[in-house]
Amino acid sequence: MITFHNVSKVYNKHSVALEDIDLEIKPGEFVSIVGRSGAGKSTLIKMLIGEEKPTKGRVVFGAYEVNKLRAKDLPKLRRQIGIVFQDFKLLPRKNAYENVAFALEVEGRSQHEIEDLVPQVLDMVGLGDKHHNFPHELSGGEKQRVAIARAMIHRPAVLIADEPTGNLDEANSEEIVRLISKINELGTTVILATHNKHVVNLLHKRVIALANGKVVSDEEKAKYVLA
């Protein structure tokens, strides 16, 4: 369970990123958070992973009150959250297999575990034949699939996709959305932050719309209707 209790983030009197946010996201939900650039989507995500603290209010993820976590406790939280970004953030000198394996290596997992888990997750995202390809040898859609594989290698409870189709054409965007939907169907909670109306409207899932740091609508099986 993820909850935002009366959360506000004020940087200064001229910059209010979020104002009085009350939200609840249940385990297994697929939620799209939409709004124009500057609406507060990124700030909301940063608070959930502990990169930002609210000016007031509480952010709760499962047993964690995120806003009260000390820096040394954040890695435990973040191992339960996979994150996918618009710009992929792949290591250019590592191939697809090595990019995914690296996430396990930094955690100190054994070579046996790595050799067992990495092929499984690359197969899951449809890249079973691309293990040895480097990022420059992959299409944009394939790069994002590697990024999703890396995000899922820890089998997180939640997948956050922050503008995952921002650098992709429409066809690749639809493929990535289908993949993320499949991951959700397997039980992972998905939070999709985007301003891509086409992607949101394909899903027909819950849509939370932000504008000027406030929730302006929160509807089940909705479409992106903000101008």
Image: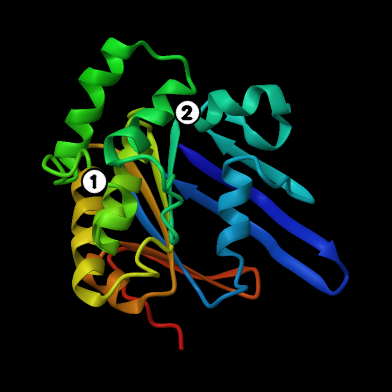
Residue type pointed to by label 1: Asn
Compare residues 135 and 108 and report the one nearer the observer.
135
Compare residues 31 and 98 and report the one nearer the observer.
98
Q: With respect to residue 46, does 172 lie above or below?
A: below
The Cα atoms of the two marked residues, 2 and 1, are separated by: 26 Å
Q: Secondary structure at mark 1?
A: loop
Q: With respect to residue 3, does 156 lie above or below?
A: above
Give residue 50's position: percent from left, percent from top.
Answer: 64, 40
Check the picture and name the quadrant holding the N terminus. Answer: top left
Whether residue 27 is visible here, answered yes or no, is: no
Q: Indicate left or right for 203 with 49 as reference.
A: left
Give the residue pinned by disc 1. Answer: 133
Quarter of the view holding residue 58? top right
Q: Indicate left or right for 156 with 173 as reference.
A: right
Give residue 217's position: percent from left, percent from top.
Answer: 48, 71
Q: Indicate left or right for 199 with 61 as reference.
A: left
Task: In the displayed orientation, state which residue is furthest to the front.
Answer: 93
Q: Secondary structure at mark 2?
A: loop
Lower sequence index among marks 2 and 1 = 2
Residue type pointed to by label 2: Arg
Residue shown at the point (22%, 34%) measured from the top left: 121
Q: Disc 2 or disc 1, which is closer to the eye?
A: 1
Give the residue pinned by disc 2. Answer: 79
Quarter of the view holding residue 173? bottom left
Residue shown at the point (32%, 31%) measured from the top left: 153
Compare residues 77 and 91 and report the one nearer the observer.
91
Check disc 2: other Cα within 10 Å, few if <14, some if 14-19, many if 20+: some
Residue shown at the point (70%, 63%) measured from the top left: 19
